[in-house]
Amino acid sequence: MILSGQQIRERLGNDIIIDPFDEANLNPNSYNLSLHNELMVYEELVLDMAKANRVRRIEIPAEGLTLSPNQLYLGRTIEKTTTHNLVPQIEGRSSIGRLGLFVHVTAGFGDVGFSGFWTLEMFAVQPIRIYPGVPICQIFYHELTGEVTEYASKYQHNRDIQPSLLHEEFAGGKTPDPQLPLEFGNGTKR
């Protein structure tokens, strides 16, 4: 079950915190989140899952910035959200999708208990001009059944755009030997 806009409003301050909150961004069953004025891009030509990859920042000026195809841009929402007893999820707004801009590559699903800014993995089908503050995506909330264990991992309480921290999951933080089974920090092996 997905919460209606009215239920989102009723649960504000308890199970749902959206800061800042603007009533004009509340939809029938979601809330629009806006794009911050900064992006991040990876500097590496080949991204390595086992290492922290170098990034650089790009400011989105008031007059806009044109995104290029075949380039991953990391952004973030202006709003910080906190969710308890519900599962948050973001999706691109249909008006944004109709311009060929993906706002999350695959990571739109959040965890119960997440608190922070949403990092957006933006990818353009063709060149597109974007602007800071534009309502870029929408958050909606799923009801949760069963015992709740809240999220308490590496992206919790972020304060900025978050590049991938997957490298932290590799045991010992070292590059894996391709001849050996790969062991991750959680004890699983490849």
Image (cartoon, rainbow, N blue to C red):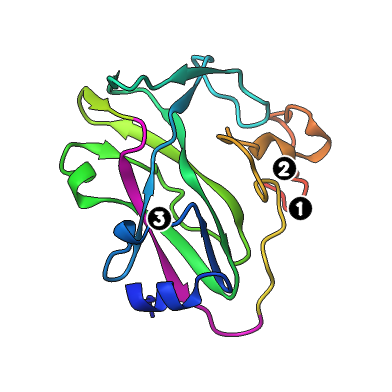
Give, as a three-letter code, the residue at label 2.
Glu
Which label lies toward us, 2 or 3?
3
Quarter of the N terminus within the rendering: bottom left
Residue 97 — which label?
none
Upstream in sequence: badge 2 or badge 3: 3
Provide the residue designation for mark 2: 169
Residue annotated with mark 3: 90
Q: Residue at x 38, y 22 (%)?
A: 60
Comparing marks 3 and 1, which lies closer to the viewer? 3
Magenta span: 132-147
Q: Using a 10 Å C-alpha cutoff, classify the residue at mark 3 as few (fewer than 14 neighbours), some (14 to 19) or many (20 or more).
A: many
The residue that appears at 46% across and 26% down in the rendered structure is: 39
Q: Which residue is mark 1?
A: 186
Which residue reaches farthest bottom?
146
Q: Is residue 138 above or below residue 46?
A: below
Res 181 visible: no
Disc on the earlier residue, 3 or 1: 3
Mark 1 neighbour density, 10 Å: few (under 14) some (14–19) many (20 or more): few
| Residue 40 falls inside the magenta stretch | no
* Callout 1 secondary element: loop
Q: Is residue 5 left or right of residue 57?
A: left
Left or right of 107: which side holds 157? Answer: right
Q: Tell me where residue 31 appears, x and y as whole percent.
A: 36, 60
Q: At label 1, which amino acid type do we have? A: Asn
Q: CA distance from mark 2 to mark 3?
A: 24 Å
Percent position (x, y) of residue 92?
30, 49
